[in-house]
Amino acid sequence: MPNKRRTRQQTQQFFCPICQQRLWRSGGTKYHLYYQGKAEIQEKLNITSKRASFIATHHPVYVDANVWLEEFFCKVDLKMWLRLSKASDGLLHSRLATQADWERSVKTPDPDLPNSTVSEFTYRMSRRTGQHLARYEM
């Protein structure tokens, strides 16, 4: 069984678009993008009009398995979301996620808003921890 650890060497690394340091995957879920309508499917997938109309009639909402949003962590810039797209050669291309990408993703939490399952009191108290610690250190 030679080369059984070969996939570890082939793992693609991503780098921060701001500070150029290595990014680390947060281990969260992938949020795939979707497209609606023949024209949008044809434009985003770069396919013929006939094939796009076939897909649009069978799937009113087409979820693209080759494009998704994923959370990454940078040591300098902290948490960031990237739009990853898988090319035909198997390589992943990344760029920062835009607002249009967020609107086209499936079941994605809004990164600008706090977690909806956390109560307002808990969220408010978590923001004040630094103030309380500074008072006790004196």
Image (cartoon, rainbow, N blue to C red):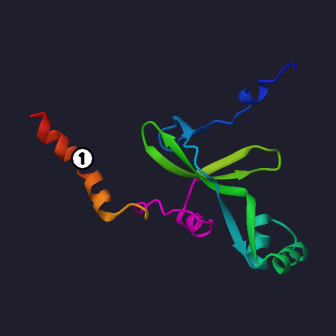
Q: Is residue 93 left or right of residue 74?
A: right
Q: Which residue is at a point 51% across and 62% down the rendered structure image? A: 109
Residue 113 in magenta stretch: yes
Using the rendered view, name the quadrant where residue 59 is placed.
Answer: bottom right
Is 1 placed above or below 77 here?
A: above
| Residue 68, position as x, y percentages in the image | 66, 56
Using the rendered view, name the quadrant where residue 23 is placed.
Answer: top right
Residue 104 in magenta stretch: yes
Is 81 placed above or below 102 here?
A: above
Q: Which residue is at a point 13% across and 34% down the rendered structure image? A: 137
| Dominant secondary structure, magenta | loop
Q: Is residue 98 left or right of residue 76?
A: right
The quarter in which the C terminus is drawn is: top left
The quarter in which the N terminus is drawn is: top right
Quickly name the residue at label 1: 129
| Residue 101, position as x, y percentages in the image | 59, 64
The magenta segment is: 96-115
